[in-house]
Structures are given as structure tokens and as C-alpha cells.
Amino acid sequence: MTTAFLFLFALLLAGPENRIGSNPGFESGTLDWVVWTEDSVVSGELRLEAVDSLAPEGAHFGRVDLATGRGRSRRSSLRLASPPWSAAPLSRYSIRFQARGPASIFVAFHDGSRNWRELGGFEVPLTPQWRTFQGEWITDRQTAGPLRAVFHVGARAGRIDLDDLVVEDLGWVDTTWYEGADRRIDSLRRVSQVVVVRDSAGIAQGGKALHLRLHRHAFPFGTAIAFSRQEPPSEDELWYRRTAASLFNAATVESDFKWPRYESVEGNPDTAQIERYLRWGDSLGIPLRAHALVWGIQAGGFDTFWATDTHLLSCARIAENIRSRIQRDMARFQGRIQDYDVWNEAIHEPAFLDACQDDPRFAPEGRALQDSAFRWARSADPTARLWINEYGNLEGDDNEALFQEVRSMLDRGTPVDGIGVQGHFGGQDIDPVLVGARLDRLATLGLPIRVTEFDNERRAGVAAFDEEGQAVQFSRFLRLAYSHPAVDGIHLWGFWDRQHWLHAMNPEVSPGMWTVDRRPKPVVDSVRRLWGREWGLDTTIILDAGGRAALRVVPGRYRIELEGASFRDVELLGGDAVFSLPDLPDGTARPSARSGRVRVVAGRGAVVLERADHGDALVVEVWDVRRRRVAREIFGTGRTSLRIALPAAGFHVVRILGENGASRHPFVSPP
């Protein structure tokens, strides 16, 4: 009886399950928050107020009156800090609160165990009406002890009200998921393939040995490239281009498409340099990503660029220049460039948004200018994939800021097709558990994720690893990213020290895979071992009596040999591929399976696949955000619709094997 009473008493003290903080200081009638400022220009007072007719339920709410402000600022100098809660390493916490006010504020968690270091945060777009806001945090391995919610409120003069603050413990991050990376890769990145070989008379070639060797993955593994304008190219330049083509199957134009480099003189864009990249890529079958249409950085001379000089030009003029740039250049390269970083680093480089913060056409606070850029891009080339690109999301604490940014864009109907995450780790020891949890959070938005700019350099006095350690870091990151179902490509941000942006800024930094004098570092062997052997395919199989062989393949382009006849470049993406011996030497054979295009429709509690015809049988897999396969069904011949029940709401990926190969369809099932 005593034990039961104590247990019940403990539950009453604990309150709702997982809740670790609820409106501290407001409903108690005391104000035990901390207010501090580092700037005498900004001043304000926080106090308790009695509930008015528009406030949420409760006896009190917090009110701060700001006499002055600093303009649009995410991390302002006047801060309100809640009482602390206890936090644990590698855990997830949520915050929910209501607020109203004249301008955006920034909310973050701060770690008291490390001198109140900020663990990241997100911008909150306030309105004069009460609204509810919610976000999440993932603590790293060093976090242990007190945690505070901190509100940065000093952007503009005015009155800001806060109420109903709730912090909840969402549980520990799964620390074992990386151990299953190889199993996930085998299931996610390999597909079932049937190969049938006949002679010119249609007779099956049973009993013969068929050799298949993958020479180019379908999964994009790319690099940033920066070509010299020198003609004819030097020997170093030729080596650089050959090496890029030998290791990578995708590329990003590193700087030559950035607006100040591309059109340094108004009306004279350097299309010749972009054409040089395109000719190189076309000759090798390497697609190019265009980086970037808009970048708001105000450093390195960008702040005096003729098209976006925020010191001289009005918001209207900047917006018109951005619109013209997008429409002109995307129309020029339509059909030749498929992927664009439309807006680069909007969270960290908000200069253009700042310039438009008071323009009602781009409310709230200039944010609609970013939305407009994506709409202009969609109109200019409806076939292109449009990306937002950011840093600090995998390698830093700004993961939630990007999540909130993209979610608000989707809520406003902005046509963003994918999330680009950069991954400049700066000599860190990469934690696959923490990076995986951050990918999980972004994946719940239902968009594909592309790692756009990965590097991790040896930096004197910073990095704890040598060249062998760098190889370990690369392998670890590639394995964790390749095993995540939401990741649809990985790009390094350069591979040769001499052409690497970090080495150019600091010769003491050694970030590439090859040294300046072209010596390969150990990372070269480790990367080739992964893509060429561990994740590749080089095998010989014996055809059965019907000339048939069934196996699991990595989607991509293969060289196939059969007793002297060879096929140099065949695309195997799953399903059935039928070859006739006379086709093999001239390289004209292609997989024969054709199934009508499948439409994936997400619903509450289920996902429905629809197709217009009665195509071939398809294998359909559904994976959840935790990288678990939750369903596997056969979309049989003769059926035009298939409904698959889902065990839970949230982010999922549908994988269809046999739909002209293999395809992936991310979606979010509503609760």
C-alpha cells in the first residue's frame, strides 16, 4: 500500500508524461526568468501581466516592452531566459509556446553545462494575434545538466507577449542505428534484376557465363568543380578533369555560376565558361548542378555587386534584378541543367531579406522575396528541380532553423523540390548518430535531401586526425548518408587541395583527397573501395536453361560480357532486361521492361499507388523515417491501383522496383 501511494504521489508531481517544464514563472505568479542585454542601444522590461480578453487561458502571461530595437536580427542583444531544466546527451526535446508581437524573434536552447552555449534555434514570425509555435532540439554527446529556453527579442521596438511555454522530453536518439547501415544499404540501394539472353533466332542462351560489372552508379556521387579558363588547358588542368570524371558521376559548378562571378559586368554574363562545363559533362554523361541563382552574402565584395547592392538599391530594384537573372539564365539552360540551388544560405546570409523587411509586397519581413524567387524559377523552367541550400545543419546546431524555414515555405506553397545540406565539418570528429538524427528531423518534411558540399579537412591545431583519420571520417560520413532513405545524392565540395576553397583561404589546411602535387591521400583508396567494390558489382553468373539469371544489382550502367560478345554500356535499374546477342557488340540493347508511370498519393493511414495501364508486376517497399521497412507488396499485372496501410503517420519513402527500373517517392502521411 505504501509503495503504491508513493508511486501515485510521484506521478502527480511529475505531471503529464515527458513534460519537463510548463509555463515556468507565469502561472506561479512569480517571474523567475533572466533578462540580459549586451547593447545599451536596446532596452526593454519583462513583467507579468494579467490575462486580457485576447490572451490564452491562465492567470498570467509575460510581457516585454522594447523602447528601442536593432532592426531585423535573429540573435539580438536583448534576451529572455526561462528557468533551467535538466537535459541529457543525445536526447530530443520539444518546445511549444504562444506569442504575439510586432516582429520576428529568435528562440533557442542554451546548455548550462557549457557556459550556456547555444544549441541552435529558429526564427519565429510573430503577428499581432496570439499564435502557437513549436520546435525541436537534439542535444549532442557533451550536453548534460541545465538547459534554458532563450528568446532573442531585441529586433524592433514594441510589445511582445509570451505564454503557455511547454518543454517536453521526446526521448533518446537511437544510438544503434548506424550499426545497421550496411543492412539498410543492401536493402535500399540494391534492386532485383532479371537478365534474359537470347540469340538472333530467339533461342535462349542457357548454360553460358554472363559477366556484369558496374561502371557508373545511378545514385549521384559528385564533386564541386572549378575549371581554368586557360586555353589550351595545362597538364594539371587535364589531370584535374580526368580525375573528376574517373571518380564522380555528378558535379556542381563551384563558383562560376554565382552571380557576381557569372555576370560581373551588367548585361555580359560569362556563358562561355558555363558552356565549357556543360560540354565536359555532356561528353561524359555527368549532369551538372547550378550553384547558385541567389546568394545574399555581404562579404568579399558581394555587398557592392551592381545587381544587389543593399547600400544603394531599393528592395524593388533588387527584386527585379533577381527575377530577371533567374528567368534569363534558367531559360537559356533549360533541358541542359536539371538542378538549381535557387537560394543559397538564406538563414545565415539574410541581406536581401533585410533589404525588403519593410516592403509590404514581400511581407512578412522580406520572406516572400525568397518565395518569389522559387516561383520565378518554376515558371522559367518547369522541368528543373529547385533546391534550398544551407550550412550548419549536419555539422552544426542550425538543423532546426532549416527545418522551420523549409516547413514555412511549404506551408506558403513555395515550389521547393529538395533540401540541400552542406556538411563542412571543419576538422570535427563526425558523430554518425547525431548526424543521422538531424537527417531524420529534416526527412519528416517529405522532401529529398542532397548532401551538397561535404568536406572535412585536416587543420593544424584543430583536427584530431591525420591523413589516415581523414579517410575514416570520409568513409563514416558516406556510409551514414548513403544508408539514409531520404538522401538522394552526395557531393563533395572539391577533391584536390590546389583547387579547394579551404586551401585557397589557408595553405595550412589540407582538405582534399589529393595533395597540391597530386599525391593521393589514403582517403582516395577508402572512397574507391566503397563505391567501386563494397557498393559496386562485379560478378559472373551462369544462365539457366531459359537463358535467364536473377540477381540483385546496384542501379546504374554496366559492362556486360557473354562468351566473347560484350555490351559496353547498359543501364540496369531493376525489373527485366532482355538482350539479343547481335545487340551486344553495338551497345544498342536496353532493358525491355516497361511499366506505366506510377503516381504515389499519401493519405491518412495509408499510401495509394495508381497507374493508367495494366503494366508489369512491380515490387513496392515502404520505409519510415527510422529507416525501417514497414511494408513490402507486389503491384501485380492487371492492377491499376494498390493501397498499402501504414502503421504510423509521418515521413516515408516508397521504393518501386521495376518502374522502368527503380524509383523513390518521399511523402508525409498526415496524422
Image (spheres, rainbow, N blue to C red):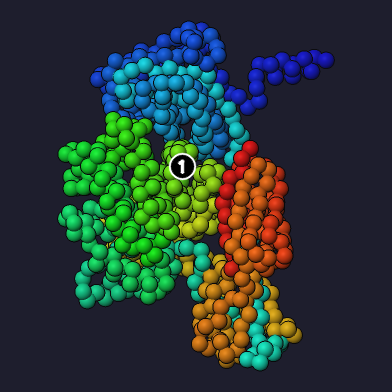
Out of 55 and 460, give the one closest to the viewer: 55
Looking at the picture, tell me which residue is in the foreground, 471 or 606. Answer: 606
Q: Nearer the viewer, residue 594 or 629?
A: 594
Give the residue type at disc 1: Gly
Considering every residue shown, the one lying at the far right of the view is 1
Residue 427 placement (x, y as % from top left): 39, 50
| Corner quadrant of residue 110 | top left
Question: Compared with residue 134, is residue 267 higher up or lower down, i.e. above or below?
Answer: below
Q: Residue at x 80, y 14 (%)?
A: 2
Which percent across, then down, holds residue 442? Answer: 51, 44
Residue at 60 percent across and 33 percent down: it is: 170
Instruction: Work out whether 42 lies above or below 241.
Output: above
Q: Determine the residue positioned at 49% across, 51% down.
A: 449
Q: Residue at x 28, y 35 (%)?
A: 356
Residue furthest to the front = 612
Dot 1 surroundings within 10 Å: few (below 14), some, or many (20 or more)? few
Image location (x, y in percent) of residue 409:
44, 40
Which quarter of the rendering shows the N terminus?
Answer: top right
Q: How many marks?
A: 1
Side of 50 relative to 376 (left or right): right
Q: Going by the image, does 415 lie left or right of 507?
A: right
Q: Is residue 235 above or below residue 248?
A: below
43 vs 143, left or right, is left
The quadrant in which residue 638 appears is: bottom right
Please say whether residue 64 is visible from this viewpoint: yes
Give x and y (percent) for residue 339.
41, 58
Residue occupied by mark 1 = 413
Quadrant of the rendering where the C terminus is positioned: top right
Q: Is residue 472 visible?
A: no
Residue 618 is left or right of residue 129, and the answer is: right
* SS under mark 1: loop
